[in-house]
Image (tube, rainbow, N blue to C red):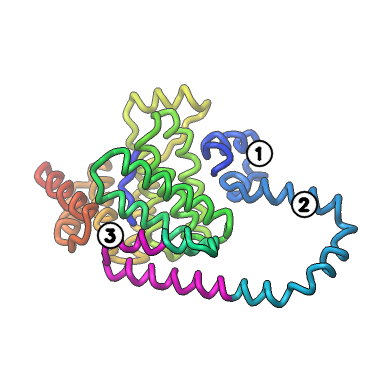
């Protein structure tokens, strides 16, 4: 199930999530369902309870290196902030995706090998942007897998980063191009949970709201074949409605009017499915008139023109 979207290592995300489904919904948080951090936290907590008596000794033994480590940490943090700012400015200025990818990869693979959530989710984004420019399937797959891995690590390092959650969901979705329909369905829950978490952490982010709308539209729009396939995987397959999708798209537009050709396109498509031709024409016309800045914009405008011709 592939979404049009802009711009967890241990076990496949879908299978990890299905284990969580056996718990009461009230007992399952977004973090326990979708990241490896909880597993690590449990291991660390268990280990700490066994060796708590050694904490004082270990603290004293490390005091001599504390100042140096603190300075090094501050230096590495400043470097991460600077590279993140450079990458963000380059992205917002529409610079070459290949150059942004190379810049971030050089930093991540550098001698210090500093792991920063802010750098890693931007690298995931850069991987996806670069993948849009390549034609060979294997090269595209390698970039998507690389970005997926980086996004997962970004969430692991900072489970409260809305952007990290958003980009995990985007990359899991993009991985869907290279896996079976069954695996896409397994991963679909994970995608939704990360988008919901991103919206929870930053309610003002229009892109996260749009992507949650795309998830709802996709499941409302499932073909008979895919519904049957879903029924073989889940006792209760994921479902949604066009009304729910429309609510998310309208909220995204309210948060940032005219921010994305794909949001206007999906508003038009959703209204068409709901037999609201007047609003469908309104949103599709708006999409066609928007500025084209990348291949996804081109795709959105092209589809909007096709749909308008059918109204």
- Label drawn at residue 260: 3
- The answer to whether residue 10 is visible is yes
Q: How many marks?
A: 3
Of residues 307 and 244, the one drawn nearer to the viewer in this rendering:
307
Looking at marks 3 and 2 on the same chain, the residue that comes earlier in the sequence is marked by: 2
C-beta proximity under 8 Å, tags 1 and 2: no
The magenta-colored residue range is 75-104
- Tag in front: 1 or 3: 3
Please tell me how crowded label 1 is: few (under 14), some (14-19), or many (20+) other residues with Cα within 10 Å. few
> Main structural element of the magenta stretch: helix, strand or loop?
helix
User: Residue at the spot x=43%, y=36% of the render?
Assistant: 239
SS at mark 3 in the image: loop
Of residues 111 and 86, the one drawn nearer to the viewer in this rendering:
111
Of residues 114 and 160, the one drawn nearer to the viewer in this rendering:
114
Q: In the drawing, does residue 243 fall left or right of residue 76?
A: left
- Image spot of residue 289 (x, y percent): 14, 61
SS at mark 1 in the image: loop
Marks 1/3: CA–CA distance: 37 Å
Q: Is residue 225 above or below residue 283?
A: above
Residue indicated by mark 1: 24
- Tag in front: 1 or 2: 2
User: Residue at the spot x=54%, y=64% of the render?
Assistant: 112
Quarter containing the N terminus: top left
Q: Is residue 88 magenta?
A: yes
User: Residue at the spot x=53%, y=53% of the render?
Assistant: 153
């Amino acid at each position: 199930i592939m979404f049009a979207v802009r711009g967890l290592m241990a076990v496949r995300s879908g299978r990890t999530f299905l284990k969580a489904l056996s718990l009461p919904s009230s007992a399952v948080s977004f973090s326990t369902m979708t990241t490896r951090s909880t597993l690590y936290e449990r291991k660390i907590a268990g280990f700490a309870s066994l060796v708590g008596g050694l904490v004082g000794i270990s603290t004293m033994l490390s005091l001599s290196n504390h100042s140096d480590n603190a300075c090094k940490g501050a230096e590495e943090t400043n470097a991460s902030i600077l590279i993140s700012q450079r990458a963000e400015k380059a992205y917002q200025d529409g610079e070459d995706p290949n150059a942004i990818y190379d810049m971030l990869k050089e930093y991540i693979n550098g001698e210090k090998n500093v792991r920063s959530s802010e750098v890693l989710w931007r690298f995931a984004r850069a991987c996806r942007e670069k993948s849009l420019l390549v034609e060979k399937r294997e090269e595209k797959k390698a970039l998507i897998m690389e970005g997926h891995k980086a996004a997962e690590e970004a969430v692991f390092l900072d489970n409260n980063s809305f952007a990290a959650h958003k980009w995990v969901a985007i990359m899991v979705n993009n991985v869907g191009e290279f896996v079976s329909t069954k695996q896409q369905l397994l991963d679909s829950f994970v995608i939704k949970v990360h988008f919901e978490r991103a919206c929870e952490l930053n309610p003002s982010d229009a892109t996260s709201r749009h992507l949650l709308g795309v998830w709802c539209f996709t499941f409302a729009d499932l073909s008979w074949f895919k519904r049957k396939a879903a029924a073989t995987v889940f006792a209760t397959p994921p479902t949604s409605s066009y009304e729910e999708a429309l609510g998310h798209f309208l909220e995204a537009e309210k948060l940032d009017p005219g921010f994305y050709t794909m949001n206007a396109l999906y508003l038009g498509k959703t209204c068409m499915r709901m037999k609201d031709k007047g609003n469908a024409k309104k949103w599709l016309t708006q999409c066609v008139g928007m500025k084209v800045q990348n291949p996804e914009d081109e795709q959105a405008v092209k589809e909007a023109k096709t749909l308008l011709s059918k109204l």
